[in-house]
Image (cartoon, grey):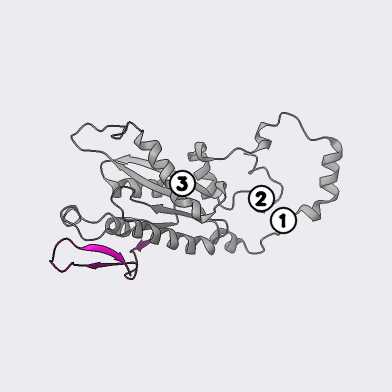
Amino acid sequence: MLRCLEIEPVWRQPTASQLAFELAHPDQVKLTARSERLKRDPLNSVLRRRFNRELTRPKARSDLAAQLASGPIVAVALDLVEGSDALNEALRVTSERILATLPSARLACLNVLKLGRITIDRTLDEEGRNKHIGRLVALRHWASPLGLDESRLTVHVLEAVDPASAILEFTGVNHADHIVIGARQNSLMRALLGSVSARVAAEAACTVTVVRPPRSAVALVHDQEGRKPKAIEA
């Protein structure tokens, strides 16, 4: 609310979508020291700000269209269980390139905790740790190399039977402008159930970037006896 009341427009949320996102996820909003203030500033502080306004005024954006374009919501969907390290690294590189051109963009990191259709799901892993909290920590760890300010980064663990539907619902409700998702390698599960990334790309109402790890990152070679292939860095 304090950001909404800023006198200078460039200190407010850049778009209404980002404001709606913060209102929908208040637990992700970082509270600063001024949120705890109970009294007004002294008169001399107010006068100092008023008469030195030009010195503290941020550089205004001259083009409203450029401001709106630079403040989208980018959602990146990560597989923390079956996703490969190479794919997750490729997702980070792609996200970094996108954010480099969007100084006011918000990054929402998503992971789907898949629930069973019939079986009873356990909230704790085999070591007794909460799965939900563990994945939230993993998402922040993945995003830490991006060096984003906390006001531009949120992490979300969605619980759903259908991962694709969960991603589509979250990005639709939160008016995401761009989805970054990894393409899982060929597998029996993918052949039977279809690709989550393909469905998201087909049904999403926004731009979708499907990422694959670079071919040069990992090469598969067979040993001389033709047994299980081993992964080596190229």
Q: Secondary structure at mark 3?
A: helix
Which label belongs to residue 58? 1
Three-letter code, disc 2: Trp
Quick check: is 219 in the magenta stretch? yes
Q: Is residue 207 something that shows in the picture?
A: no
Element under disc 1: loop
Residue, x 36% and y 51% (percent of image)? 78
Q: Which residue is mark 2?
A: 11
Quadrant of the rendered image containing residue 187: bottom left
Question: Disc 3 marks which amino acid?
Answer: Arg
Measure the C-alpha gap from mark 1 to mark 2: 8 Å
Would you place residue 47 above or below residue 190 in this image? Answer: above
Q: Read off the magenta span.
A: 209-234
Is 205 situated left or right of 16 in this image? left
Quadrant housing residue 223? bottom left
Mark 3 Cα shell of 10 Å, populated few (<14), some (14-19), many (≥20): some
- The reply, left or right, for residue 173 in relation to residue 119 is right
Mark toward the start of the polypeptide (1 vs 3): 1
Amino acid marked by disc 1: Pro
Q: Image check: 35 left or right of 191? A: right
Q: Please state, as top left, top right, bottom left or bottom right, where the C terminus lies in the image.
A: bottom left
Question: From the viewer's perspective, is 233 left or right of 39?
Answer: left
Quadrant where the image shows the N terminus: top right
